[in-house]
Amino acid sequence: MSRLVKILFLSLSIVALYGVDKDTPFKPGPASSFADKLTVDKLTIAVEPYMSDDKTREAFGKLNPYEYGILPVLVVMQNDGDKPLRLDRMKVEYAYRGERIEATPAADVPFTHAPKRPNVSNPLPFPRRAGKNPLQKFEIEARSFAAKMLLPGQSASGFFYFQTGHRSGSSLYLAGIYEAATNKELFFFEVPFSR
């Protein structure tokens, strides 16, 4: 066997052993298939909070961000209109009883949960390893919502992250979506969570 074939076989074995491949795309399905969705002017926005281990495993592998105070909310957008939409100025907030919590940028999520500090009370000079930050995972940024434009007939999806617990009666507020040609802002969306 050639060296290249051995390396390829070893790489595939490691990927199979550890489960989620970093290059495996996360495919949530069409916006119309979600329970929590809203359609305005032929733009459908679907939302789903990811809290349970079963749900988060699909997107983040063994990591459940909700256990560390981060609520991941999947947003799926489908443009069934005939105009391209700009999403680069989109503002997303978690709304509950008049209170709004801004989304935490994916790059900042690892800094919301610091790793455990080493025990410095030990009088012996043995070095101790500092705890690893569980939120410093590839999937947090890779699965975040990154679309800047949504063409007619296309869809986009990804996660927004909030430093809150999920509450009954809450909703996701989205504003700052513009028609690309006219720069006209679409009406804001407030999609309620059913659970």
Image: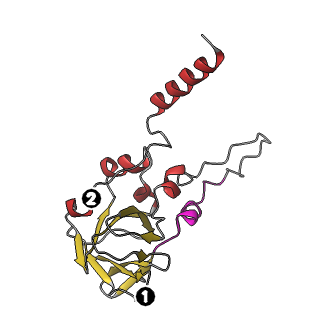
Judged from this view, the residue extending furthest toward the top is 1
Is 63 located above or below residue 152 in the figure?
above
Residue at horizontal 49%, vertical 43%? 23
Query: Can the viewer see residue 163 in this picture?
Result: no
Q: Tell us which disc is closer to us: 1 or 2.
A: 1
Percent x, y of residue 177: 40, 81
Q: Which residues are magenta?
A: 103-117
* Few, some or many residues within 10 Å of mark 2 (<14, 14–19, 20+): some
Residue at horizontal 54%, vertical 50%? 138
Residue 104 appears left or right of 55: right
Is 164 located above or below residue 52 in the figure?
below
Q: Quadrant of residue 175?
A: bottom left
Residue picked out by circle 2 = 30
Residue type at tag 1: Thr
Percent x, y of residue 110: 57, 60
Residue 95 appears left or right of 109: left
Q: Quadrant of residue 30?
A: bottom left
Badge 1 or badge 2: first in the primary sequence: 2
Percent x, y of residue 97: 29, 85
